[in-house]
Image: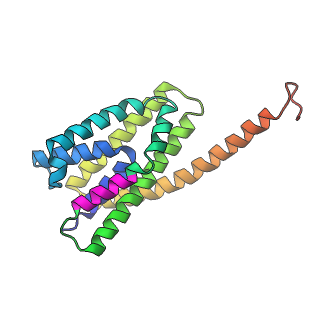
Amino acid sequence: MFPTGLLAGSGWASGLNLWAVVGLLGIAGRAGWADTPELLQNPLVIAAAVVLYAAEFVVDKIPYIDSAWDIANTAIRPTGAAALAILMTPHESTPHRVVAVAGAATTALTSHSAKASLRALINISPEPASNIIASLSEDGLAFALVGFAFAHPRVALVITIVASIACVAFVWWAIRTLHRLGRRLLARGRRTPTGRAV
């Protein structure tokens, strides 16, 4: 059976934290909670995912460093989601696999873009607490969606579609907001100490 719900949920969650998804899928498979790819159940793969998740767990909570990390992961997270889709559809036809890969990569890109946009907004006035809360919330969403997809794949598919649309809308709003703030900062920089334009 084509694992549409789990594919969608895993893809979207990978945009927030790829290594959390890889580790969770691997552990779930070994524990018998879900039918996941054998490669992900390899203890070395799980160990590597846990180590990378731990590194991201720390980096993701440091102002500005988290944004740099997001930029570095712009290609990695969607590509990782696409790779997971390939692993999860070994017996499907080529058209189905193409759709799975494209869908997983697209949903991962939407959630990743929303995550990166949110961090950029937070870092305008960096507060460690804000980054920590955002990071923990993102990790929680990733774990919750994948776990929910194990039990309720159809509902998870609907949630993923709605979440992806919301992410696109949020990114559009965030870009406009950042653009306006950037113009205000440039306008202030062009003024003299007396408040007159140069």
The quarter in which the C terminus is drawn is top right
Residue 141 percent coordinates (x, y): 35, 44
Q: Position of residue 140 (x, y in %)?
A: 33, 40
Q: Is residue 156 visible to us here?
A: no
Q: Is residue 65 left or right of residue 40?
A: right
The residue positioned 21% from the left and 53% from the top of the image is 150
Q: Residue at x 20, y 54 (%)?
A: 151
| Horizontal arrangement in the rendering, residue 65 relative to residue 155 (left or right) | right
* Residue 137 seen in this snapshot: yes
State the residue at coordinates (26%, 61%). 86
Report the side of 74 relative to 9 (left or right). Answer: right
Q: Residue at x 48, y 25 (%)?
A: 128
Spot occupied by residue 73 in the image (x, y as percentages of width and height): 43, 45
Q: Quadrant of the N terminus?
A: bottom left
Image position, residue 80 (x, y; %): 33, 52
Q: Let me know if residue 37 is in the magenta part.
A: no
Q: Which residues are magenta?
A: 78-88
The overriding secondary structure of the stretch rendered in magenta is: helix
Q: Nearer the viewer, residue 45 or 168?
A: 45
Compared to residue 3, the image places residue 80 above or below, namely: above
What's the coloring here? rainbow
Query: Residue 136 sits in which quadrant?
Result: top left
